Amino acid sequence: MTIYDQHMHTLYSFDSEAQLRDYLAQTQAPVVTTEHLEFDNPDDGGRDDLPDYAGMKRTQAALASHYQNEMLLGIEAGYFAPAEERLRDYLANHDFDLTLLSFHHDGQHDYLDAQLAGLPAKQQLEDYFTRMLAGLKQFHDADVLAHFDYGLRLFDITPEQLEAWGKPLLDQIFAIAVAHDLALELNTKSMYRWHNAPLYDQAISWYQQAGGHLFTIGSDAHEGPHYEANFKQALAMLKRHGVKEIATYRRHHRTMVPIEPPVVDADNVY
Protein backbone atom coordinates (compact mmCIF):
# COMPACT_ATOMS: atom_id res chain seq x y z
CA MET A 1 0.00 0.00 0.00
CA THR A 2 1.39 3.33 -1.13
CA ILE A 3 0.78 7.01 -0.50
CA TYR A 4 0.09 8.84 -3.74
CA ASP A 5 -1.27 12.15 -4.99
CA GLN A 6 -5.08 12.18 -5.26
CA HIS A 7 -5.71 15.57 -6.86
CA MET A 8 -4.08 16.25 -10.25
CA HIS A 9 -5.07 17.70 -13.61
CA THR A 10 -3.99 17.22 -17.22
CA LEU A 11 -4.99 18.73 -20.56
CA TYR A 12 -8.41 17.12 -20.14
CA SER A 13 -9.12 19.95 -17.68
CA PHE A 14 -9.92 23.36 -19.14
CA ASP A 15 -7.12 25.04 -17.15
CA SER A 16 -4.23 22.61 -17.62
CA GLU A 17 -1.85 21.62 -20.41
CA ALA A 18 -0.12 18.85 -18.46
CA GLN A 19 0.31 15.40 -19.97
CA LEU A 20 -0.48 12.24 -18.03
CA ARG A 21 3.07 11.04 -18.68
CA ASP A 22 4.39 14.10 -16.80
CA TYR A 23 3.12 12.46 -13.62
CA LEU A 24 3.77 8.84 -14.54
CA ALA A 25 7.45 9.58 -15.10
CA GLN A 26 7.90 10.67 -11.48
CA THR A 27 6.59 7.65 -9.60
CA GLN A 28 6.03 3.92 -9.52
CA ALA A 29 2.89 4.46 -7.43
CA PRO A 30 -0.67 4.51 -8.76
CA VAL A 31 -1.53 7.69 -10.65
CA VAL A 32 -5.03 9.13 -10.52
CA THR A 33 -6.12 12.20 -12.44
CA THR A 34 -9.06 14.27 -11.22
CA GLU A 35 -10.15 16.43 -14.14
CA HIS A 36 -12.55 19.32 -13.74
CA LEU A 37 -16.26 18.70 -14.19
CA GLU A 38 -17.63 22.22 -14.08
CA PHE A 39 -21.00 23.53 -15.23
CA ASP A 40 -21.80 27.13 -16.23
CA ASN A 41 -18.14 27.83 -15.57
CA PRO A 42 -17.53 31.59 -15.32
CA ASP A 43 -13.80 30.92 -15.54
CA ASP A 44 -14.35 29.52 -19.04
CA GLY A 45 -16.92 31.82 -20.58
CA GLY A 46 -19.90 30.20 -18.85
CA ARG A 47 -19.35 26.90 -20.64
CA ASP A 48 -19.99 23.43 -19.31
CA ASP A 49 -16.57 21.80 -18.97
CA LEU A 50 -17.05 18.05 -19.27
CA PRO A 51 -13.84 16.05 -19.58
CA ASP A 52 -13.53 13.76 -22.60
CA TYR A 53 -14.05 10.43 -20.88
CA ALA A 54 -13.26 8.32 -23.94
CA GLY A 55 -10.18 10.41 -24.60
CA MET A 56 -8.92 9.93 -21.06
CA LYS A 57 -9.36 6.18 -21.37
CA ARG A 58 -7.52 6.17 -24.71
CA THR A 59 -4.63 8.09 -23.21
CA GLN A 60 -4.33 5.62 -20.35
CA ALA A 61 -4.38 2.69 -22.77
CA ALA A 62 -1.74 4.27 -25.00
CA LEU A 63 0.63 4.79 -22.06
CA ALA A 64 0.03 1.41 -20.42
CA SER A 65 2.76 -0.28 -22.47
CA HIS A 66 5.32 2.36 -21.46
CA TYR A 67 4.60 2.70 -17.74
CA GLN A 68 3.91 0.04 -15.15
CA ASN A 69 1.87 2.29 -12.86
CA GLU A 70 -1.70 1.46 -11.99
CA MET A 71 -3.69 4.18 -13.75
CA LEU A 72 -6.85 5.32 -12.01
CA LEU A 73 -9.46 7.80 -13.14
CA GLY A 74 -10.96 10.37 -10.83
CA ILE A 75 -13.07 13.47 -11.26
CA GLU A 76 -13.26 16.83 -9.51
CA ALA A 77 -16.98 17.52 -9.45
CA GLY A 78 -17.72 21.21 -9.10
CA TYR A 79 -21.08 21.76 -7.44
CA PHE A 80 -23.30 24.63 -8.62
CA ALA A 81 -26.90 24.39 -7.47
CA PRO A 82 -28.66 25.25 -10.78
CA ALA A 83 -26.59 22.55 -12.51
CA GLU A 84 -27.16 19.78 -9.97
CA GLU A 85 -29.16 17.58 -12.33
CA ARG A 86 -26.50 17.86 -15.04
CA LEU A 87 -23.84 16.97 -12.49
CA ARG A 88 -25.75 13.93 -11.27
CA ASP A 89 -26.43 12.79 -14.82
CA TYR A 90 -22.77 12.95 -15.85
CA LEU A 91 -21.59 11.08 -12.78
CA ALA A 92 -24.29 8.43 -13.16
CA ASN A 93 -23.16 7.70 -16.71
CA HIS A 94 -19.39 7.54 -16.18
CA ASP A 95 -17.32 5.24 -13.98
CA PHE A 96 -14.64 6.75 -11.77
CA ASP A 97 -12.36 5.53 -9.02
CA LEU A 98 -12.51 8.74 -7.00
CA THR A 99 -14.83 11.74 -6.82
CA LEU A 100 -13.64 14.99 -5.30
CA LEU A 101 -16.35 17.48 -4.40
CA SER A 102 -15.50 21.14 -4.91
CA PHE A 103 -17.20 24.52 -4.76
CA HIS A 104 -15.48 26.77 -7.29
CA HIS A 105 -17.93 29.49 -8.32
CA ASP A 106 -21.18 31.27 -7.56
CA GLY A 107 -22.47 31.43 -11.13
CA GLN A 108 -20.97 34.85 -11.78
CA HIS A 109 -17.39 34.54 -10.59
CA ASP A 110 -14.90 31.81 -9.87
CA TYR A 111 -13.73 32.33 -6.30
CA LEU A 112 -10.23 33.09 -7.64
CA ASP A 113 -11.53 35.93 -9.81
CA ALA A 114 -9.47 39.02 -8.96
CA GLN A 115 -12.67 41.09 -8.93
CA LEU A 116 -13.60 39.42 -5.64
CA ALA A 117 -10.38 40.41 -3.89
CA GLY A 118 -11.81 43.82 -3.01
CA LEU A 119 -14.77 42.39 -1.10
CA PRO A 120 -14.75 42.34 2.70
CA ALA A 121 -13.06 39.12 3.82
CA LYS A 122 -15.76 38.32 6.37
CA GLN A 123 -18.51 38.70 3.76
CA GLN A 124 -16.70 36.44 1.32
CA LEU A 125 -15.98 33.78 3.94
CA GLU A 126 -19.56 33.67 5.17
CA ASP A 127 -20.97 33.60 1.64
CA TYR A 128 -18.62 30.83 0.56
CA PHE A 129 -19.27 28.55 3.52
CA THR A 130 -23.02 29.24 3.37
CA ARG A 131 -23.04 28.10 -0.26
CA MET A 132 -20.92 25.07 0.60
CA LEU A 133 -23.24 24.09 3.45
CA ALA A 134 -26.34 24.43 1.27
CA GLY A 135 -24.65 22.43 -1.47
CA LEU A 136 -23.60 19.63 0.85
CA LYS A 137 -27.13 19.32 2.16
CA GLN A 138 -28.28 18.66 -1.40
CA PHE A 139 -25.33 16.75 -2.83
CA HIS A 140 -22.76 14.57 -1.07
CA ASP A 141 -22.30 11.68 -3.51
CA ALA A 142 -18.52 11.93 -3.45
CA ASP A 143 -15.52 10.48 -1.67
CA VAL A 144 -13.62 13.62 -0.68
CA LEU A 145 -14.36 17.23 0.25
CA ALA A 146 -11.64 19.07 -1.66
CA HIS A 147 -9.87 22.31 -0.64
CA PHE A 148 -12.40 23.47 1.95
CA ASP A 149 -10.71 26.89 1.80
CA TYR A 150 -10.91 27.48 -1.97
CA GLY A 151 -13.12 30.55 -1.61
CA LEU A 152 -10.68 32.08 0.87
CA ARG A 153 -7.51 31.83 -1.20
CA LEU A 154 -7.56 35.50 -2.26
CA PHE A 155 -7.82 36.68 1.34
CA ASP A 156 -5.34 36.69 4.22
CA ILE A 157 -7.64 34.91 6.66
CA THR A 158 -6.09 34.24 10.06
CA PRO A 159 -6.93 31.23 12.23
CA GLU A 160 -8.60 33.63 14.66
CA GLN A 161 -10.82 35.02 11.91
CA LEU A 162 -11.64 31.55 10.63
CA GLU A 163 -12.79 30.58 14.10
CA ALA A 164 -14.76 33.77 14.73
CA TRP A 165 -16.41 33.98 11.32
CA GLY A 166 -16.45 30.44 10.01
CA LYS A 167 -16.49 27.83 12.75
CA PRO A 168 -20.29 27.66 13.20
CA LEU A 169 -20.69 26.99 9.48
CA LEU A 170 -17.69 24.66 9.26
CA ASP A 171 -18.98 22.63 12.19
CA GLN A 172 -22.16 21.98 10.20
CA ILE A 173 -20.20 21.32 7.00
CA PHE A 174 -17.93 18.81 8.69
CA ALA A 175 -20.86 17.11 10.42
CA ILE A 176 -22.46 16.46 7.03
CA ALA A 177 -19.14 15.35 5.57
CA VAL A 178 -18.61 12.87 8.39
CA ALA A 179 -22.18 11.57 8.16
CA HIS A 180 -21.61 10.73 4.50
CA ASP A 181 -18.04 9.42 4.83
CA LEU A 182 -16.47 12.32 2.97
CA ALA A 183 -12.74 12.48 3.58
CA LEU A 184 -11.15 15.87 4.26
CA GLU A 185 -8.52 16.75 1.68
CA LEU A 186 -5.27 18.40 2.64
CA ASN A 187 -4.75 20.47 -0.49
CA THR A 188 -1.08 21.34 -0.61
CA LYS A 189 -1.61 24.10 -3.17
CA SER A 190 -3.88 25.88 -0.71
CA MET A 191 -1.53 25.15 2.14
CA TYR A 192 1.80 26.15 0.64
CA ARG A 193 1.15 28.25 -2.47
CA TRP A 194 -1.73 30.20 -0.97
CA HIS A 195 -0.25 30.02 2.55
CA ASN A 196 -3.33 28.56 4.23
CA ALA A 197 -1.54 25.78 6.12
CA PRO A 198 -2.54 27.32 9.50
CA LEU A 199 -6.20 27.11 8.46
CA TYR A 200 -5.80 23.42 7.62
CA ASP A 201 -4.10 22.81 10.96
CA GLN A 202 -7.22 24.24 12.58
CA ALA A 203 -9.72 22.51 10.29
CA ILE A 204 -8.22 19.08 10.92
CA SER A 205 -9.06 19.44 14.61
CA TRP A 206 -12.61 20.58 13.90
CA TYR A 207 -13.18 17.74 11.45
CA GLN A 208 -11.89 15.29 14.05
CA GLN A 209 -14.16 16.81 16.71
CA ALA A 210 -17.07 16.13 14.34
CA GLY A 211 -16.04 12.48 14.32
CA GLY A 212 -14.01 12.58 11.12
CA HIS A 213 -11.06 10.26 10.60
CA LEU A 214 -10.72 10.10 6.80
CA PHE A 215 -8.05 12.23 5.17
CA THR A 216 -6.51 12.49 1.71
CA ILE A 217 -3.64 14.58 0.38
CA GLY A 218 -3.73 16.21 -3.04
CA SER A 219 -1.33 18.62 -4.70
CA ASP A 220 -3.98 20.11 -7.02
CA ALA A 221 -1.20 19.97 -9.62
CA HIS A 222 -1.92 21.45 -13.03
CA GLU A 223 1.62 20.75 -14.24
CA GLY A 224 4.12 17.97 -13.68
CA PRO A 225 6.54 19.81 -11.36
CA HIS A 226 3.84 20.11 -8.70
CA TYR A 227 3.19 16.38 -8.37
CA GLU A 228 3.13 15.52 -4.63
CA ALA A 229 4.26 19.06 -3.84
CA ASN A 230 4.91 19.59 -0.11
CA PHE A 231 3.58 16.13 0.78
CA LYS A 232 6.15 15.67 3.53
CA GLN A 233 4.90 18.77 5.33
CA ALA A 234 1.26 17.70 4.95
CA LEU A 235 2.03 14.23 6.31
CA ALA A 236 3.86 15.78 9.26
CA MET A 237 0.81 17.92 10.02
CA LEU A 238 -1.46 14.88 10.02
CA LYS A 239 0.91 13.06 12.36
CA ARG A 240 0.79 15.98 14.80
CA HIS A 241 -2.98 15.46 14.95
CA GLY A 242 -2.61 11.78 15.71
CA VAL A 243 -3.61 10.64 12.23
CA LYS A 244 -2.00 7.32 11.36
CA GLU A 245 -3.37 6.61 7.88
CA ILE A 246 -4.87 8.24 4.83
CA ALA A 247 -7.65 7.04 2.57
CA THR A 248 -7.12 5.97 -1.03
CA TYR A 249 -9.86 5.02 -3.48
CA ARG A 250 -10.44 2.54 -6.29
CA ARG A 251 -13.93 2.28 -7.79
CA HIS A 252 -14.97 4.33 -4.75
CA HIS A 253 -13.79 1.53 -2.47
CA ARG A 254 -11.69 2.93 0.34
CA THR A 255 -8.31 1.50 1.37
CA MET A 256 -6.47 2.94 4.36
CA VAL A 257 -2.73 3.44 3.92
CA PRO A 258 -0.36 3.96 6.90
CA ILE A 259 1.50 7.27 6.85
CA GLU A 260 4.42 5.89 8.83
CA PRO A 261 7.00 5.69 7.40
CA PRO A 262 6.12 8.75 5.28
CA VAL A 263 7.24 7.42 1.92
CA VAL A 264 6.62 9.78 -1.01
CA ASP A 265 8.17 9.76 -4.46
CA ALA A 266 8.76 13.45 -5.08
CA ASP A 267 10.37 16.41 -3.34
CA ASN A 268 8.41 18.97 -5.34
CA VAL A 269 7.28 22.17 -3.64
CA TYR A 270 5.04 25.14 -4.32
Image: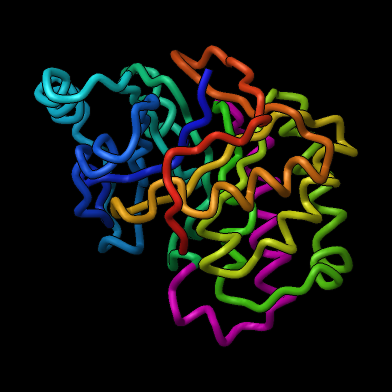
Q: Does the stretch in magenta take in 123?
A: yes
Q: Main secondary structure of the magenta part?
A: helix
Looking at the image, which residue is at 43% across and 39% down?
A: 265
Magenta-drawn segment = 112-141
Q: Residue 64: x and y, percent?
A: 16, 19
Looking at the image, which residue is at 73% across and 61% down?
A: 199
Position of 235 with respect to 90 (left or right) is: right
Position of 80 with respect to 57 (left or right) is: right
Work out whether 225 lies above or below 212: below
Q: Closest to the observer: 43 or 190?
A: 190
Position of 17 with respect to 165 (left or right) is: left
Q: Does the stretch in magenta take in 44?
A: no
Q: Residue 72: x and y, percent?
A: 34, 22
Residue 254's quadrant in the figure? top right
Position of 175 with respect to 247 (left or right) is: right
Residue 244's quadrant in the figure? top right
- Colour theme: rainbow
Residue 121's quadrant in the figure? bottom right
Q: Closest to the observer: 235 or 40?
A: 235
Looking at the image, which residue is at 9% across and 23% down?
A: 62
Q: Residue 46: x and y, percent?
A: 30, 59
Q: Taking the image as drawn, is residue 81 in sight?
A: no
Looking at the image, which residue is at 58% across and 33% down?
A: 144
- Report the number of numbered marks: 0
Q: Residue 114: x and y, percent?
A: 45, 80
Q: Taking the image as drawn, is residue 1 in sight?
A: yes
